[in-house]
Image: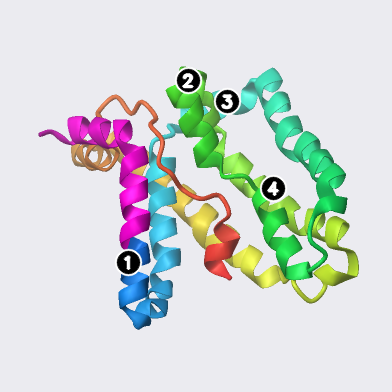
Amino acid sequence: MSLASLRDTLEMRQVPIYFVAMAAAGVLAWLWNGTTRLTVAIDPLLAFMLFVTFLQVPLTELTRALSNLRFLAALLIANFVAVPLLVALLLPWLPNDPLLRIGMLLVLLTPCIDYVVTFAHLGKANAKSLLASTPLLLALQMVLLPVYLGLFLGEAADGLVQLGPFLHAFLWLIALPLSLAALCQAWAARMRIGARLVERQTGHSDRTPYTFDVDSDIVLGSS
């Protein structure tokens, strides 16, 4: 089985694979008390997954997506205006406990971009442009999330929200994987061995974007 066919099979059966993986993780955590030692692997694995995701987005596609002003405006307004307004309406019904509130706000204000791309791909929508916009969406989420948390939590955010994890996540989980992906694409454009490496990582030679389920709430992994 080629890498491309294996990848297509995994894409088609990703839902049962997720359930099996979660069940296996639950059993492992129940049987082995030392699973907390595996937390050091979270950041490197997230960085690698984001690197492979960004590797699927040719820089020309990123430029084209950013130049489509109507698409970009609809995307940014939906994510960073409409969603926060909806959260503001739901805020009175959220739990009063600050820790519970911050958890729910993280989920609501920084929705997983990978799910949106996956659903768009399965629904035959313009997943290509959406995937190309992923670096911008991730970066804006990292920049605006502390602002939103300060607005919605008020003084309670002072002791819960720290700048360090956000900077760490932006540098190591967005800037570094994106830069490495850009270097690999430049290498692939100049040398055949680079093109073969990119093909092996993405599973196809035409570099048509596919989706990886990468959680956009990467601050949680870097905290």
Distance between mark 2 and mark 4 Cα atoms = 23 Å
Residue appearing at x 84%, y 62% in the figure:
153
Residue appearing at x 59%, y 61% in the figure:
219
Residue appearing at x 52%, y 20% in the figure:
126
Residue appearing at x 63%, y 48% in the figure:
139
**Position of the C terminus by quadrant:** bottom right
Relative horizontal placement of residue 217, taking residue 36 as reference (left or right): right
Dot 2 lies on which element?
loop
Which residue is at the front of the view, 162 or 96?
96
**Position of the N terminus by quadrant:** top left
What type is the residue that disc 1 sits on?
Answer: Val
Verify whether residue 44 appears in magenta.
Answer: no
What type is the residue that disc 2 sits on?
Answer: Gly
Residue 70 is marked as none
What type is the residue that disc 3 sits on?
Answer: Ala
Distance between mark 4 and mark 3 Cα atoms = 25 Å
| Residue named by callout 4 | 108
| Residue named by callout 3 | 65
